[in-house]
Amino acid sequence: MPVSRRAFLAGAASLPLAARAVSASDPALTLTAAPARLQIAPPDYPATDVWAYDAQVPGRMLRYRQGDEVQLRLANGLDQPTTIHWHGLRLPNAMDGVPGMTQPAVAPGDSFDYRFTARDAGTFWYHPHANSTEQISRGLAGVLVVDDAKGPDVDADEVIVLDDWRMTQEAQIHASFDDWHDLSHAGRLGNYITANGLPDLRLTAAPGDRLRLRLVNTATARIFRLRLSGLRAWIAALDGMPLAQPQEADEVMIAPAQRVDLLADVTAKAGEEAVIGSVERDGTYATAVIAVSGAGGATRPAPAPLAPNHMSDLSLDTARAVALKMEGGAMRGLPDGAVWEGTRMDMRELAEMGQFWAFNGVAGMTDDPLVDAALGETVRIPITNATAFPHAMHLHGTHFREVLADGTLGPWRDTLLVMPDQTREIAFAAENPGDWMFHCHMLSHQKSGMMNWIRVT
Ligand SMILES: [Cu+2]
């Protein structure tokens, strides 16, 4: 496989070894969201002014054991309100971090205490849910891993956070957060890709090692297509939830906000490299390189499934179905008479309000939820993408399963990529009371119309 080292604007330079993520089970930790200046670009470029959790990009790595009580104080050192959403965690509604819905936004200088039980083991992440396009694009995102008591037998467990930055020639974050082209097309795509905040993440392994690779996409718009070389890999979990049977894969698609846990055996020999490459229009670029050295281990049998989290059965036969139709964006446009904040508008008026997309004919939030579900009910939502762009739909508060064409159920997920002209149906058990966001995680799309909510009472 031809793999090029990523060049940043001009030539790339060699980089130091990646810093090991700090593990923290501190019972009462403060996470401070504040400006910081970090070397994100290669060393021959200036440091970048970012917004970061505890002056780290990605933010401080949080690691708990399943069943742990998580207690975290968010301190806001930004000059604008923020919150933390704990993406993919099943937690009480008041801890979900959606300003104006589950909590007031945290004002500059203020703090908010989050407390919940780490119920599910898996790979999760955290990020602001206020002014999200700007705050996440500037660097506010971190990973939260919950370990189960008996993890898989692996030689290493690595978190690989993929991100996509829109940088200026001076390696500063481009202040284009409301660009109409981004809002109405594929979102705010960047020009510089990092893994764990580095242009060229370097790891080491021995031949035959079995690695758990926790891939996390924190980009606000980019869908990564990853090609693996020097590895025999199985997808073991999606969005934190183990698959019933690991699936062998040499390519992995990961949409914004999604996670993919791989169990990967190093097949590269000593002196060679295993590579996680990002497939792009003009070639495949290395995002993470694993230098292989030392004595080889024996070939192993395919991995066993990870220990499942406890999920409720879905009662599809008695489920209520509520359809969601996505419309709008460039090339297709919004239907006539789309509504924004209770008022019918034409497309030009909506565009002037920065609204380019609609769910069921409404741009932005509605007074009434898309679904008002009774506790214990199973809900089905067929999602039809009538736009010309892919959308990564994220449901807060619970995972869902896709209802496949043959009536069987797909894996548990919290974010589903729906391609243009596809209809894909999800089903979930309404078992977590509260008001929960259901929105596109291409954050430019969320901001310009693609959000709704679900009530469980
Ligand atoms: Cu979208």
Image (cartoon, rainbow, N blue to C red):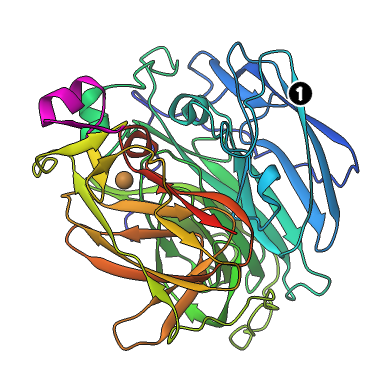
Magenta part of the chain = 342-356
Q: Secondary structure at mark 1?
A: strand
Q: Residue at x 54, y 61 (%)?
A: 239
Rendering coords of residue 7 (x, y %): 37, 32
Compared with 147, 344 (above or below) is above
Circle 1 Cα neighbour tier, 10 Å, few/some/many (<14 / 14–19 / ≥20) = some
Q: Is residue 204 visible?
A: no
Q: Residue at x 49, y 35 (%)?
A: 199
Q: Which one is in front, 354 or 306?
A: 354
Compared with 28, 327 (above or below) is below
**Image quarter in which the N terminus is found:** bottom left
Q: Which one is in front, 121 or 328?
A: 328
Rendering coords of residue 2 (x, y %): 32, 55
Residue type (three-letter) at the residue carrying disc 1: Ser
Q: Quadrant of residue 290?
A: bottom right
**Residue at the far right in the pictured view:** 27
Compared with 36, 7 (above or below) is below
Q: Which one is in front, 112 or 17?
A: 112
Q: Which one is in front, 251 or 30?
A: 30
Q: Residue at x 81, y 75 (%)?
A: 150
Rendering coords of residue 421 (x, y %): 17, 61
- The response on whether ligand 1 sits within 8 Å of label 1 is no
Is 345 a magenta residue? yes
Q: Quadrant of residue 47?
A: top right
**Image quarter in which the C terminus is found:** bottom right
Horizontal side of residue 292 vs 260, given as left or right: right
Q: Circle 1 is placed at which residue position?
A: 111
Is 247 a magenta residue? no
Rendering coords of residue 309 (x, y %): 68, 73
